Each structure stands twice: as structure tokens, then as C-alpha cells.
Image (spheres, rainbow, N blue to C red):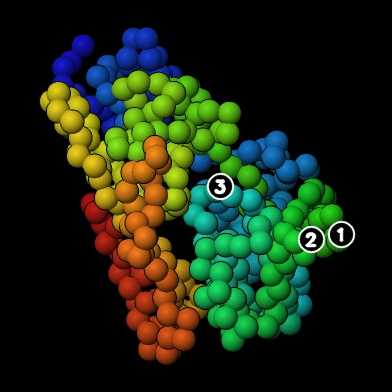
Amino acid sequence: MPSARATLLAAASTAVADVLASVTLADGNRLAYDRLVLAPGIDIRWDGLPGYDEAAANVMPHAWKAGEQTLLLRRQLESMEDGGLVVISAPANPFRCPPGPYERASLIAYYLKSKKPKSKLILLDAKDAFSKQRLFQNAWKELYPNLEWVSLSSGGKVTAVEPASKTVVTDFSRHQAAVANIIPPQKAARVADLAQVADRSGWCPVDAMTFESKQQPNIHVIGDAAIMGAMPKSAFSANAQAKVCAAAVAKLLAGQKPEEPRLINTCYSVVAPDYGITVAGVYRPKDGVLSDIEGAGGVSPIDAPAATRAAEASYADGWFKTITTEVFG
């Protein structure tokens, strides 16, 4: 076995053999490792919402994995008649990108306001609170009177869907949608099960210092699949975790003790093309998980002027270009 080597997979893996400390890739090649870094991402819990399965996703797209699902949701919105009802369901925590459902609702509401002003959007939520809530709700009140958020305590939790009629069911109501975007419960993707790094929650508990799995030695898990305590499942988080994990692996392979990390997350949300809002946090290991460093983070000012909102939208675009260039070259 090669010594002093960590392997970060860029190809889809089909099997992880912890006894042999090797990974088999989809093309049949096998890679031996001393330490393995996995970034599994997420999968949909197809058994997490009655009536919602892979066939239903072709009618009521989740669009929570980029690609055909995202394009399908776009086509449905474009072909919907003015006056149609759009319904979005947001799941309970944890899930990929906590502010995502609310940014999506905002931008769909912007599209409807611009192109189909007779239409309405209802956001059904399995939670009573969400990231940047006050900022989002203030923006909705100002910009999108046809956007209605229904909280958990107000009956917003979706209990079933009926794809044949595009009906979304809660404990107290039924909504027949022209377009239904169902964001279902999630879990770590399949490679996490193959590597046996996911626990009964479906996610991957890790050591907060090194991101080494608490289920399997010498395997590290970063990104959306991992349980990170206060640090959210975001692209910024995953990028920061990759760097800290790489430094920790290098120390471990050299027989040294990794340093205690500090990690940052900044999450931009665009509510309209010229209206951005932000939340930021700084984290350190505490009691086995990543915890907020008090006073080190924060959100955009509630009463910021229009120029500040426009600047934050510009910052969001700049951050996207920077991180995609850094990751993909």
C-alpha cells in the first residue's frame, strides 16, 4: 500500500472496502489509501414523504440536485398560465442549503411579478424558523405581496403529495398547484452507506478537529453529508472544510497533531436582481462539534438602504464567480 497518501475521489465510487483500505471506482479501477476523504453530497429520502418518489419528481420536481430537475422546474414555470398557483414545500432540518427554499421562493416570486403577475406562490414549511428569516420576510412584504409563507405552527408541514393532480396535502389544507416544487427530506448520498460512515440519522458524524468519521477510522467526510454542529450545509462551508481537512490529513500522515481549526461560512441570498442579503458565521470545535464563536458572525442590517442591498447582490455574484473558479479552474 502506498504510504503517506490521502486520496480525494473525483470519479464516482461504487464500493469502499475498509478492510482492504481501497476504493473501487465506476470504471473498475481500484485505489488504495492510507486516509480517504469523501464528499458524498446528498440524496433524496424517497421514503420520507408519502406519495413522493422518483416518478413523482418528474411531475413535481425537487430541483435540489442541479441538472434535469432544475431545467424541468424552469420549463414548468415558463409554460404555466398567468394566474397559476406555485407551491413550494420546505423540509425540516437538516437539509442542503438552509436558506435555499427561501431564496428560490424569492426569485420565483420575482419572475411571477415580472412575467405572470396574476399568479401566486405559497411556501409550505415544516419549520417555524429559518435562516435570515426576518430579512427575507421584510423583503417579501416590500416586493412580493403574492408570496405567502405558511409556518409549521400554522399548518405548513406537507404530509403527502398526489402527483396525478399536483396536489400538496397538509394536516389542514389541500393545494392544487400549477407548479409544485417539492423539496423532500434528505440524507447523505449512497457512497456514505457504502463506506459505512453514515449513522441512523442518514448523515455522517465526524470529529470536529479533523473531519474524520466517527463510524470508520481513516475516512474523512466533508460537505453536505457531514454532521457539523452549528456549521450549515453550504457551498462556502464545504470549501472551507476541504481546506481544513486537507491540512489535518497532512499533519496526521506526518505523525503530527492537527491544529484546532477556525472555519468561516458566508451565505449570500439574492431576493431580487438588485437585492441581496447575507449571513456569516465563524466556528470552532467545542464538545465534539463545530460551534458558533459568539459575536463573530451576523446578518445584513435590517434597515439597510437600497444601495447596500444592491451591493450585496453584487458581492453574491462575485463570490459565485470566485468559488467556481477556485474549485473548477
- Rate crowding at label 3 as few (under 14), some (14 to 19) or many (20 or more) other CA atoms within 10 Å: some
Q: Which residue is mark 2?
A: 155
- Rate crowding at label 1 as few (under 14), some (14 to 19) or many (20 or more) other CA atoms within 10 Å: few
Can you tell which quarter of the image residue 258 is in? top left
Percent position of residue 265, x then y = 35, 57
Q: Earlier in the sequence, mark 2 or mark 3?
A: 3
Frontmost residue, 238 versus 320:
238
Q: What residue is at 30 percent from the left and 69 percent from the top?
A: 318
* Residue type beneath disc 3: Pro
In space, the residues marked 3 and 1 are separated at their CA atoms by: 24 Å
* Residue type beneath disc 2: Gly
Residue 94: which disc?
A: 3
Residue 199 higher or lower than 153, as above or below: above
- Rate crowding at label 2 as few (under 14), some (14 to 19) or many (20 or more) other CA atoms within 10 Å: some
- In the rendered structure, are the residues bearing label 2 and label 1 in contact, judged by CB atoms less than 8 Å apart? yes
Seen in the image, is 96 located left or right of residue 122?
left
Q: Earlier in the sequence, mark 2 or mark 1?
A: 2
Q: Which residue is mark 1?
A: 172
* Residue type beneath disc 1: Phe
In space, the residues marked 2 and 3 are separated at their CA atoms by: 20 Å
Seen in the image, is 65 located left or right of residue 208?
right
